[in-house]
Image (cartoon, helix red, strand yellow):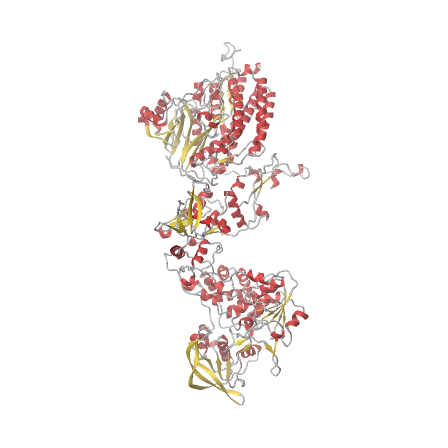
Amino acid sequence: MNVARKKTAPHPYVRLEEMVLNMGPQHPSTHGVLRLVIRLNGELVVKAEPVLGYLHRGFEKLAENRTYYQFLSMLSRLDYLAGIFMEWAYVNCIEDLMEIEVPRRAEYLRVIAGELVRIASHQMSTGDFLLNLGTWTPFFWTFRDREVILDLLEMLTGQRMMYNYIRVGGVKEDIPADFERECRKFLKEFPAKIDEYEKLVTDNEIFLARTLGVGIIEPHEAIDYGLTGPNLRASGVTWDLRKDEGYSAYGDFDFGIPIGKHGDCFDRYKCRIEEMRQSVRIISEALDGLPEGPVRTWTPPMLRPPAGSIYRAVESPRGEWGNYLVSNGGLRPWRVKMRDPSFIAISTLPRILPGYKIADVIAIGGSMDFMMGAADR
Amino acid sequence: MSTRPKIIPPVETKAQGPLVSLTVDGHEVTAHRGETLLAAAKRVGAKVPHLCVLPGVDHYAGCRLCLVEVEGEERPVPACATEVAEGMAVTTASERLLRLRRTNLELLLSDHNAYCAPPCKYRCPTNVDIPAFISLMAAGDYEEAQRVLKANLPLPASVGRVCPHPCESQCRRSEVDEPISICLSHRFVGDVAIQKGFHPEEPAPPSGKRVAVIGAGPAGIANAYYLALAGHAVTIFEALPEAGGMLRYGIPEYRLPKKVLDAELESLWKMGVELVTNTALGPDISIDGLLDEQGFDAVFLGIGAHQSRAMRIEGEHLEGVMPVVDFLRETTLGNPPDVREKVAVIGGGFSAIDAARVSLRLGAKEVTIVYRRTQKEMPAHEIEVNDAREEGVEFVFLAAPVKVEGENGRVTGLVCQKMQLGEPDQSGRRRPEPVPGSEYLMEVDTVIPAIGQLPQLTYGAKDEEERNFIDEAGGIACTRWQTIDADERTLQTDRPEVFTAGDAFTGAATVVEAIGGGKRAAQAMDAFLRGADMAAWKASLPDEKPVLLAIPAWRPEPRERQRTPMLPVAERTGGFAEIDKGFSEQAARIEGGRCLKCICEKVESCKLRRYSIDAGLLREEGNRFRGPQNLYGRDDRHAFIVRDPNRCIDCGRCVRVCREWTGSACYELVRRGPRTIAGTPFDVSLDQADCVSCGRCAVACPTGALFLRRRELKDWHLEVSRCIFCGDCVEVCPQKALAVTPEYELAVFDRGKLGIDLLKRARGEEEDGFGVLEAGLAEATGRGNPDAEEERKQ
Amino acid sequence: MPAAEREGMATAGDNGLDAEEALARIEELAGEHLREIAIDDDGKVVIDIGAGDLRPLVKTLRDDGLLSYRYLVYITAVDWEDHMQALYLFRSMKHAVQLEVRAVLDRDNPSIPSIAIFYSTACWHERETYDLMGVMFEGHPELTRILTGRKEDMFPLRKDARPKRVQRRERTTGLPPALRLPGERDWRERA
C-alpha cells in the first residue's frame, strides 16, 4: 500500500490546455458557501484560489452595537455546528475582564455541553466527508446517532443547534432530572457505534486509496500555516488548548489527545474518530464528578466590563477559536475580533492543492473540515 | 495595565466567618463575623433608622441616621458600616442618639424644597384636592378641574363667593409672599363649569334605596348630591319655597347672585333628585312618617340653624325689632322689610355685616353696627368690615343694648351701655363687662339683633304649644346647645336610620363646614344603606389629620396675588348687583401658577417622612436650619420614571442600584458640597443615558425624588419574524412582564422555555404594575425588595 | 502548562520559560526596536512598537531558539477614532508565554509592513484586516479584499462607517391564505 503519493508531473507531448473551474459557492461538497477557483491542467490542479465572503454577516460590526448580553445570543450562529464554543470563548473574555467567579458546577456543565457538541460536530464532519467521497451509509449512520446527541442537547439547553446556554457567570439553567439517565445511556451505547463506523470505513480500500498520503502537511508547515485542532494534531504536533491552557474544568479530567503521524487526510479523519472516543470519556467523568452548587453567579444584566482588552480561546472541534475583546468601559464592546480556525484552514488550500487531482480537492477539503459560517463571520 | 474592580454579587453574606456574640439593647444576639451592627440589631427587633443602606453593595454611611452607641467608643458609630465584634454592647436608642438623629433629619429637611401634604386640603372642611385643581386650572383644563372640585364640593361657584377660606390661612405660599387665592380660584372654575355646561358625574346604577333629606341647605344639598351619585333615590324636603337654605335666604344677592345658585343646583336635579318645597318638618312631615309610612330607608336632618338668639332685653318684641334671620329671609323672599331711616344692628358676625349692608340697600340712611367687644374680636372678616365701612356703615364698639325704647308699639330708640374688656372667657376672648352708669340712647327706627343662631328644634304656630319634633321621633337626643346629638365621625344619631350634619349638628357655622358634614354623612349613609357594620366602618376611616413636617419654605420669585375687579363703591349700595367680579381667565391661570404644589407622590412610602414624624419634626415647631436653596426643575422627560431632584437627599441608592443591580449606571452624585445631587451625566434625559427603564431606581429611592408615573400600556407589537426565542427578555425583565409558554412546536421536552408569551399585563391578566415590580425584583435578583421586607418584619 | 496525561508522540515541548525571563530575553535580543514592554495581568508579554520596527522584531523573535514564537494566532486592528492600533498575537510551542505586539498607526493612512514572508498564515490575516479596517500592509503579495466584495470605497469595521439605509419590503408570511387548509395558521401569526 502506498503511503506517500507522489505528485504527478504534466504529460510530455500532449498539448494540454489549462481550464479554470469554478467550484461553488453552491456546491454540495464545499461544506458551505465556499468558492474555489481552480486552474486545472487536465485533472491536475495548477492553482487554487478560495473566494470567501458569501456568508459574511458582519458579526464583528454587529457586536459593536449590541450590549454584551444581547450579543451573546448571536454567537452560536457563527460556527453553527459547534455554536457553544463561540459563546464559551466570549463569555470567558467577559468573566476574566470583570473577574467574575464561575461556580464549579457550571464549569462542569459547560464541559458536558461542549463535549456533546464536539461529538455531534465530528459526526457531522465525518459523515459529510465520507458523503463527499462517495459513500452514503456512514453519512446516515453518523447522522442517525447524531440525533441522539441533539436530543440530549435539547434536553440540556432547550435547543438543538443555537444553544444560547452559556451565560456570563455560569450556564443558563441546571440539568433536568432525566438528563443524566439519558446521557449515560447514550455514553454506554455510543462507543459501539464508533466501532461500527470504523469497521465500515477505516479499512475500506477505496477509502484508503483516496485518503492515505493525500494532502500531507508537515508539522512545521502546519504551525507556519497557523492550523489548529485536529488538522494540526494530525500532522503530529501535540497541541490542544484543553491540555495546554487547561481552561474551565478540563484540568479535572483524565483524557487523551489523539496525535497523527503523517498529516494526511486519513490521519485527520482518524483524529476525529478518536476524539469522539475521548469526549465520551470526558463526559462520563464529568457526570460522575458533577459538584453541587449554583449554576450561575449573579451578574447585573447591563454588563460593564472595565476598559481593557483580553484574548481567550477555546478548543472547538475545528481548532482554536479565539475571541479578542476590547472594552472601553461602556455597555457595548468596542471591538470584538474572532479568530477562526476554518478561516486559517481555508487559507492553506492554495498551498496544498496544487499538484493534486480534482478528486483529491474534495478529499482534502472534506478532511480539513471547515465551516463557512465561522470563516466568513 | 488596567485595574479591574471586583463585582460584589449582591447577596447577603451568610454563614461567613465564625460566630460572635454581642448585646444589643441588653439582648443577647449572635452574628457572623463580617456582618454589620445593623443586621444584628434587626435580628433583635431594634429599630434603627437608615436611609442610605442598599443590601449587597458597599455601605455609604452618609445619612448618619443609623448611629448607635457602642460601649467603650467615645462617639456613636454608624451601624451599617460597623462590623460586629465579640462582646460589643450596643445601644440603639438613647437621649443622645435621638438628638443626633433629630438633628440629622432636620438638616436633611432644611434643603428639601418640597412638601409632603397640602395643608390647605386638610384645613378645608370638605378636603377639596386643592393642589390638583389649581394645577389643572393653571394648565387650562377646566373640565378636569371642576371634576376634581366636585368630587368634594358640589357647589364651587356658590361657595367660592361666600367661603371664609380657612384653607388660605394654611397656605404655604404665605411664607413667601401672599397666599394663593384659592377661594376665588374655585369660584372661577365653578363659573366656567356653569358657563360651559360641563356634565356632572354619572351616577352609579340605582341601588333601590330611598333617602329623605330634610332641608335643602348646604348640608342637605351636599348630602343629596353624594347620595345620588352613589345611586340612591333622594327626595329633599324643604320648608321654604326654594332650595338653598342659608345660601339663598341668609346670604344677600350682592354676595351670591341667586341665578348662580340656581345654575349650580341644576346638576342636582339632573341626577334625579326630587325637591318638595313648602314642606316643613313637624307640621307637614315627621321622621316616623317618612321612615314607616312613606318607606324611606334613611333620613338626613339638615335643618340648619334658623332660630335667632333672643337678646332677652325689654322691648324685644316691639315692631321694628327683627331678628337677622327673618330680616334676610324676608328680603330674599321679596318682602323687604321697611327699615325707615336709622338702623341699629347688634352683633359682630357675618350676619350682622350682611344685615347692615342690606339695610343700606333697602334705603336706610344711617346704619350702625353695635358690638360689645372691639374690632379685633369680631368674628367677621376684616375684609367684610372694611367693605361695610366703605359703604357707609358706622361701627360702635364696646357697647351692648340694655333696652329697646318704643312708642305706640314701634321702636324709637335703643339704650346701650358701654362695655369694657375684662378677663378672657371660655372662647378665649376677653369678657365684656358693663361700665356702670354709661347708658345712653341711640335714636333708631329698626333694630336687628344678630347675636347668634340656633337650630330650630320645635315647631308650632305662635299661639300653639311648642312641640319638639326631634324628641317625637324617638331616640334622637339633643345637646344642651340646642343641636342634634350624633356621632362625630359617622354623623349617625341615636336612631340608626337618622343622620345629621351642618348647622343642626355643629351649631351656627360656615357653609363650607355644612357641606363637608353633609358629604361625610352621605358616605356614612351609603355604608349604612349597603348594610355595613357602622362600628367597623367607622374604625376603617382613615385618619384625617395629616402631619406636616418642619420643612422651611423654598422661595420662588415673589409674585403678588392676582386681584379681581370690584364694583366701584359708589355703585354698590344702589342695588343688589354683585360686587366682586371674579377672576379673568388670564388672572386665574397666573394665580394657579403661583401654587407651590405641596403634594408628593410618595407621601405614603417616604422613609424620610416616616422618620421625621417619629422624631417629632413638625411644621409648628419650625426648622432650626436653613441652608442654601438649591432649587431644581422636575425631569419628566422619561416615559414613566419621574425625577424631582428637590427631594433628593443624596443617599446614593439610585446610583448604586443602577450600577450594581442593573449595570447601566445612569446616575451619579454630581456637583460638590451642598450642591451635590443624584443626577444623570450632563443632566440628560434618562432616555439618552443607558437607562433600560427597569424602574429599580424609583423603587429604591427612599424619598419622592424618583417615582414611577402611572401609565397605561395601550398597544404593543412584536416583530415575530425577528424573534429568535432566546428567552433573554423573560430573564432580565424586573417587572416580570414577559413570561414563557410551553407552546413551541419544536419543543419535544416540556421545558417551557421556547415560546414567549408577551406582555401579560397588556392582556389584563395582571393587576396594577407597581406591586409586580416589587415581586419581580425579588424573583429577578433572588431576594426581596429590601424595604418591603423591612416593612413586613415591622 | 498543567501536568496531564498525554497519549501519542512527544509533546510540543516545555522549556520552562516564564514571563519575566521571556521579557528579559526579548529586551536583550531586540531592545532597540521596542518602545514599551510589560507583562499584563494575563501573564503575557505586551510590546508596543512603531510600525517600522515590526519586521526586524518579529524575525528575531521567531528565529530565537528559546523564545521560538513560530505560531501567529491573529493579526487585527482596532479603530480608536483618533488613531488605529494594529495587534499581533504570537504563541510558542515551546513555552507558555504569549506575546502581544501593538503598533500605533495613523488613522488617515494606516500602514505597517507585512510579515507574510515570515508567517504564511499572516497572508490572509492581513488581507482580512485590510478588508475590514483599511490598514495597508506594505510588501504583502496580494492585498485584496477577502470577506467583503467591495472595491476601495469603504472599510466596514471603522467607526465612521455607517450602513446604507435599506428599504424594507413588505414581508409575506408563509403560504398565501388561499393555499392554507381550514384552520391552519402560520406559526408566525401566533402572536
State which quadrant residue B538 falls in.
bottom right
Can residue B397 be seen by looking at this rendering? no
Residue closest to the eye, B585 or A211: A211
Count of numbered labels shown in the rendering: 0
Q: Residue lying furthest bottom in this view?
A: B408
On screen, residue A65 versus residue C46, left or right, reads right
Q: Position of residue B735 (x, y in %)?
A: 53, 46
Quadrant placement of the N terminus of chain B: top left
| Quadrant of residue A28 within the rendered picture | top right
Where is residue B36 shown, x and y percent of the image?
Answer: 42, 46
Q: Quadrant of residue B656?
A: top left
Which percent across, then down, holds residue B745? 62, 36
Pick the residue in front: B511 or B58: B58
Q: Is residue A312 visible?
A: yes
Is B325 drawn above or below residue A373 in the view shown?
below
Vertical relation: A342 (above or below) B407: above
Q: Residue furthest top?
A: A13
* Closer-to-camera residue (B506/B748): B506
Where residue A148 appears, x then y in whole percent?
59, 28
In the rendered view, would you say B434 is above or below B152?
Answer: below
